[in-house]
Amino acid sequence: MEKEFDFNRIGKRMPYKTPEGFLDEMEANVWREVQDELPKAHHKRKTFRLRVFAGAMAVAASIALLLVFHPFSPKEETDSFSHVEQAFANLSQEDQAYMLAVYQKDIFMNE
C-alpha cells in the first residue's frame, strides 16, 4: 500500500457521451422558450402590481373618506385623578387605611 497515487494514470475519459451539437441545440431551445415567455410573465406581473396598487388606493380613499365625514372628535377631557379620588372615597375606612399604609411603604414611590 505504499505506492504513490498518480492522477495521470487514471486518465481523463468522460463517462458520458452526447450527440454532436446537442448542447448548442439545447441552449438555443432554452433561449427561444425564455424569449417567448418573457413578455407573458412581465405582463402578468405588471397586471398583478396594478391590481395591488388599485386595492391599496381604494383602502386609502376609504379611510380618508371616513376621516373627512366622521372625524374622531376628542372626548371631553376629565380630570383622571378625580376618578381615583371617587374610587378611594367609596372604600371602607379599613380599606382606605390599608391602601395608605401600603402606599407609604412603597419604596419605589417614596424615593
Image (cartoon, grey):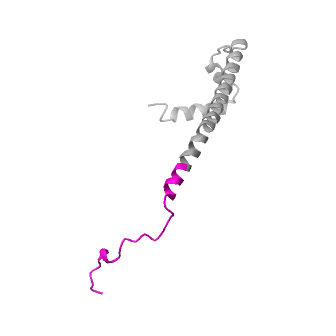
State which region is magenta: 1-28
Q: Quadrant of residue 75?
A: top right
The residue sitting at the bottom extreme is: 1
> How many numbered circles does the render carry?
0
Which residue: 64% across, 14% down? 77
Q: Quadrant of residue 69?
A: top right
Q: Is residue 10 left or right of residue 37?
A: left
Query: Closest to the observer: 12 or 44?
Result: 12
Q: Is residue 22 magenta?
A: yes
39 over 16 or under it: above or below: above
23 over 7 or under it: above or below: above
Which residue: 69% across, 12% down? 68
On the question of residue 77 being in view, the answer is yes
Name the quadrant of the C terminus.
top left
Query: Closest to the observer: 61 or 89?
Result: 61
Tell me residue 30's x, y (percent). 55, 49
Which residue: 43% across, 69% down? 14
